[in-house]
Amino acid sequence: MKRLALSDLLAFAGVAETRNFRRAAGLNATSASSLSDALHWLAARLRVRLLTQTRPSATPSAARAKLLAGLAAGVAGDFYHAE
């Protein structure tokens, strides 16, 4: 399995939910350019297109639902196993 940074996955989740890099950056206390860099790295690592970027928004791709579902399941699984 590919090792991914939780921060990159959370960056993706924020942009996918808000559909906006600036809003997601505000929620994550980071810059929009840092989020963009993280998402480019994540997409390259996964070898999928995660977002279709247009000005001023970012529309989630088809791979979005699958990644978000896996992210949610993984975080929930880690949380329950930690107790």
Image (cartoon, helix red, strand yellow):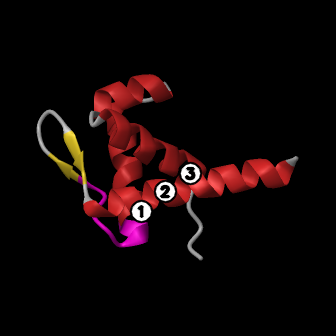
Amino acid at the residue labelled 1: Lys
Separation (CA) of disc 2 from disc 1: 5 Å
Residue at 50 percent across and 51 percent down: it is 9
Secondary structure under tag 2 reads helix
Secondary structure under tag 1 reads helix
Whether 71 is drawn above or below 20: the answer is below
Residue 36 location (% of width, % of height) = 33, 44
Contact check, label 2 and label 3, Cβ < 8 Å: yes
Residue 1 location (% of width, % of height) = 59, 77
Tell me, for residue 66, which label it has, or none.
1
Whether 14 is drawn above or below 23: the answer is below
Say which of 43 and 67 sits in front.
67
- State yes or no: residue 56 in magenta: no
Say which of 29 and 69 sits in front.
69
Q: Residues within 10 Å of mark 2 (few under 14, many from 20)?
A: few
**Mark 3 sits on what residue?**
72
